[in-house]
Amino acid sequence: MSAPTVSGTPPKKDNAVKVSLASMIGTVVESYDFFIYATAAATYFGTVFFATDDSIVGALASFATLAIGFLFRPIGGYLAGHFGDRIGRKRVLIWSLVVMGVVTTLIGVLPTFATVGIAAPIMLIVLRIIQGVAYGAEWGGAVLMAVEHAPERRRGFFGALPQIGIPGGLLLANGVILLTSDLPGDWAWRVPFLLASVMVIVGIFIRLKVAESPAFEAVKESGEVLKAPALEAIKQDWRSILRVIGLRLAETGGYYVTTSFVVSYVGLAAITDSRNVLVGTLVGSAIGLASHLLYGAWSDRIGRKKVYLIGSIFTILFGVPMFLLINTGSLVMIVVAVALSLVLSHDPIFAVESSWFSELFPANRRTSGISLGYNGAAIVAGFLPFIATAVYGAVGWIGPALLFSLLGVISTAVAITARETAPAIVGTKAEQPTLEGVR
């Protein structure tokens, strides 16, 4: 379908740097909330909420609740797409942040299994479901605010700025976990969750200061707002949505194998203290604050696909070497393994997702398309720490190692068949879906 032209005066744009930074800071807050749960599940929740002495059973139970949140993220993606394409990206971002902060704070005050028995994990699961919906509503609007305010040939760079919120949130979450690990009793895991309330207030204040996306304002002005944009995206863009799911598997699946399963694995295999893995995560995340911007800027010059393939091919090659490094038990080797996984496997892929995925969909279905694809992959990724633990219990470390590489194989195959969208590579915006209006 050809693009209707957008008439009238173009909407006023906020400074691209200001909007991208606001998106990034809000994403840091939401990512902190989400990753605190992932780390606490791997470190504490097996005994706190499931009261089992079997370490593998405890890990499986904890990772099952982690997976439940991922299972409900597509619902958040659907809601974010529907309302983001109907009433605006900004409103959805603010409400997702509020809900995420409230739920995370409530997890911090939950009674434990020792106090209320089976009611404790039930309450945890309910809150985890709500948290998954809220997080599913976050990403699409955040990256679109950045990409749609950005100059055409710098979308990769500005789109990578909110992506920094993920390593930033992980850096903050693991840093807090490390700092509170020596607190007495349950305070070691409760304090990180309770801090979410303060951070959410900061995030909301910042997000309220930015203007709505100019692409959404242009869609409104042209009268092209759809009544059911998420349903329309499923009907018309289902191939692109499936492609996004496939492209995300190496990034999101490999990420949770590295940052969640490995934390549990070193304890299950009696290799080292789990805090050594957290150190590696901190190092990799710190480097990620710069590497995302580098990869994003690079994608503006050489294309989204080429940068992406750096990460997906590295994922294929690094599965076995990563676990061999971890199995040494050496702090240095573990830090190298985890940091390399984040910087060379995850970061090149994640940095280009915001711009690449956005350029695959028209403006009046764009939040829906990228949110459904992004969160659809979460259904698979959320179960990977659970699957990796089960495979490890059956065949040892080689199972999770090959699982990690398999994700790279799948995503590389999808990437090879996907089209390039970077304006500097494909030419003028007339040759691709425009971010200024609708296709």
Image (cartoon, rainbow, N blue to C red):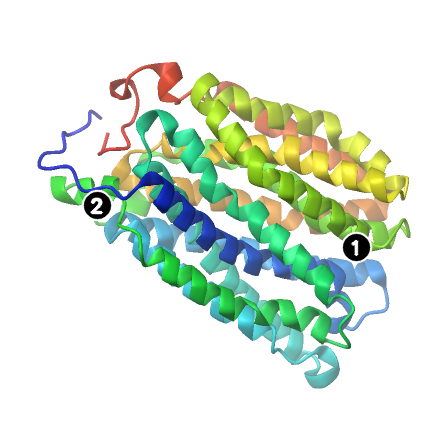
Task: Tell me the residue at 10%/37% (across/down).
Answer: 9
Quadrant position of residue 214: top left
Element marked by disc 2: loop
Kindly tell me whether residue 11 is visible in this rendering: yes
Quadrant (top left/top right/bottom left/bottom right) for the N terminus? top left
Q: Residue at x 30, y 52 (%)?
A: 210
Q: Quadrant of residue 39?
A: bottom right
- In this picture, residue 53 sits left or right of residue 68: right
Q: Amino acid at mark 1?
A: Arg
Residue occupying image coordinates x 51% and y 62%: 131
Instruction: Name the residue at the left extreme.
Output: 8
Task: Out of 99 and 150, give the one closest to the viewer.
Answer: 150
Q: Please state, as top left, top right, bottom left or bottom right, where the C terminus lies in the image.
A: top left
Toward which corner of the image does residue 122 lie, by quadrant?
Answer: bottom right
Marks 1/2 in contact by CB < 8 Å: the verdict is: no
Secondary structure category for the residue under label 1: helix
Residue 102's place in the image compared with 81, above or below, is below
- Expressed as whole percent of the image width and height from the top left, the position of residue 22 reads 40, 50
Label of residue 226 in the image: 2
Above or below, comparing residue 40 to residue 278 in the picture:
below
Crowd class of label 2 (few under 14; some 14 to 19; many from 20; radius 10 Å): some
Left or right, residue 189 beside residue 162: right
What distance separates the C-alpha of mark 1 from that of mark 2? 49 Å
Q: What residue type is disc 2 on?
A: Leu
Left or right of 62, for residue 364: left
Q: Relative to 189, is 383 above or below?
A: above
Q: Which residue is mark 1?
A: 275
Residue 393 as seen in the image, left or right of residue 153: right
